Image (cartoon, rainbow, N blue to C red):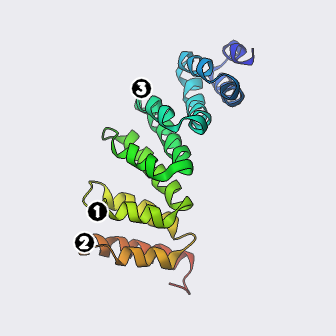
């Protein structure tokens, strides 16, 4: 009933706030109808509701939630929703999330998904994330993903992070990423760096 009332609110910003408040409990009780309802919303309320829907959906089926997010249009809707899908999925299974992300078409949505998934993956399982990423050294965008990972990893284990960077086989990549690691470490903990 609350979902049906959302569009009766006057201006679209109020509709967006109302949709945000309704979508999570609705998705928990009736995911399929909630998805249809979100898809029927005007852009602004839909843009607020889709990441919340994906968060709830990913608790049950992260692959389906992520696939749905990947087909959203326009990119202003797809990108933040894929970012949330990447975060949610990687909290449960980082390796599956980043593998899915690598198979998305190039573009801002893929970048957002992978960035969020790598950050969540490394915060949950740093050695596993580092092992996975080390095997991706030839991947376009590797340095960006490595910077995402090291930025997150530095927050809780800077020494292990620096050791991982030193082990990278490509000297140019290693030097660039190591410089970033050192600069960030120096800002956060000058005595230890």
Q: Position of residue 20 (x, y in %)?
A: 66, 30
Total numbered labels: 3
Q: CA distance from mark 1 to mark 2?
A: 8 Å
Give the labeled residue for mark 1. 137
Give the labeled residue for mark 2. 170
Q: Residue at x 42, y 26 (%)?
A: 73
Pick whichever of labels 3 and 1 is earlier in the sequence.
3
- Which label belongs to residue 81? none
Q: Is residue 59 above or below residue 123?
A: above
- In the image: residue 193, left or right of residue 135: right
State the residue in front, 147 or 167.
167
Q: Position of residue 61 (x, y in %)?
A: 54, 35
Q: Is residue 80 above or below residue 87?
A: above
Q: Position of residue 82 (x, y in %)?
A: 47, 38
Give the labeled residue for mark 3. 73
**Helix, strand or loop under label 3:** loop
Q: Residue at x 45, y 61 (%)?
A: 129
Q: Can residue 66 be seen in this snapshot?
A: yes
Q: Is residue 9 above or below residue 23?
A: above
**Helix, strand or loop under label 2:** loop
Q: Residue at x 50, y 65 (%)?
A: 126
Kindly indicate the quadrant of the structure image that contains residue 56.
Answer: top right
Pick whichever of labels 1 and 2 is earlier in the sequence.
1
Q: CA distance from mark 3 to mark 2?
A: 38 Å
Of marks 3 and 1, the one in the foreground: 1
């Amino acid at each position: 009933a609350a979902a049906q009332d959302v569009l009766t609110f006057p201006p679209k910003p109020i509709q967006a706030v109302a949709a945000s408040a309704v979508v999570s409990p609705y998705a928990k009780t009736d995911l399929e109808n909630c998805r249809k309802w979100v898809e029927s919303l005007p852009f602004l309320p839909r843009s607020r509701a889709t990441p919340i829907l994906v968060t709830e959906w990913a608790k049950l089926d992260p692959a389906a939630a992520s696939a749905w997010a990947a087909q959203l249009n326009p990119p202003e809707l797809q990108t933040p929703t894929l970012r949330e899908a990447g975060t949610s999925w990687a909290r449960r299974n980082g390796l599956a999330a980043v593998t899915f992300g690598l198979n998305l078409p190039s573009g801002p949505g893929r970048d957002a998904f992978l960035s969020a998934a790598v950050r969540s993956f490394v915060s949950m399982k740093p050695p596993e994330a580092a092992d996975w990423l080390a095997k991706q050294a030839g991947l376009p965008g590797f340095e960006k993903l490595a910077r995402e990972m090291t930025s997150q990893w530095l927050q809780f284990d800077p020494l292990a992070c620096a050791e991982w960077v030193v082990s990278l086989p490509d000297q140019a990549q290693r030097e660039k990423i190591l410089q970033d690691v050192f600069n960030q470490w120096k800002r956060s903990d000058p005595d230890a760096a």
